[in-house]
Image (cartoon, rainbow, N blue to C red):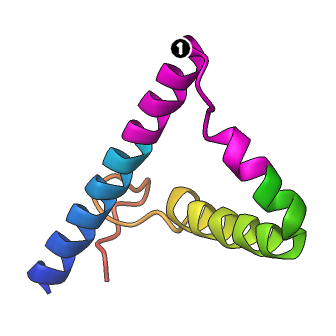
Amino acid sequence: MQALGNLFSWLVTALFGVITLLLGYETWALITDHAPITAFIRPAVRSYPGLAFVIAIVLGMLLGHFLWGPARGRTSPTGDSAV
């Protein structure tokens, strides 16, 4: 079970690393007058609005699950241990 927790931690770390790189590229592109990431995303959303809607819903559900899930563990107000 510890290996699964380590894998999840590495995946989350990699995700934040990719997000940081993408934000860095976006900043660089805006400063140097290159095409930013939004120039590629907007045409894709206009071409496939249904798919963009589904992706937005899934990402919102995942974000909501991790940010507003049940409070357990040492940091919970009741002090319940994780199951």
The image quadrant of residue 56 is bottom right
Q: Which residue is drawn at 61% across and 17% down?
A: 33
1 versus 59 height, above or below: below
- Dominant SS in magenta: helix
* Magenta span includes 28: yes
Q: What's the amino acid at mark 1?
A: Thr
Neighbour class for label 1 at 10 Å: few (<14), some, many (≥20)? few
> Vertically, is 51 above or below 10?
below
Q: What stretch is highlighted in magenta?
A: 20-42
Identity of the residue drawn at 26% across and 71% down: 8
Q: Residue furthest bottom?
A: 1
**Image: 35 above or below 30:** below
Residue named by callout 1: 32
Residue 64 spot, x, y in % from top left: 62, 62
Looking at the rendering, which quadrant does residue 14 occupy? Answer: bottom left
Residue 1 at x, y = what percent?
Answer: 14, 87
Residue 67 at x, y percent in the picture? 54, 56
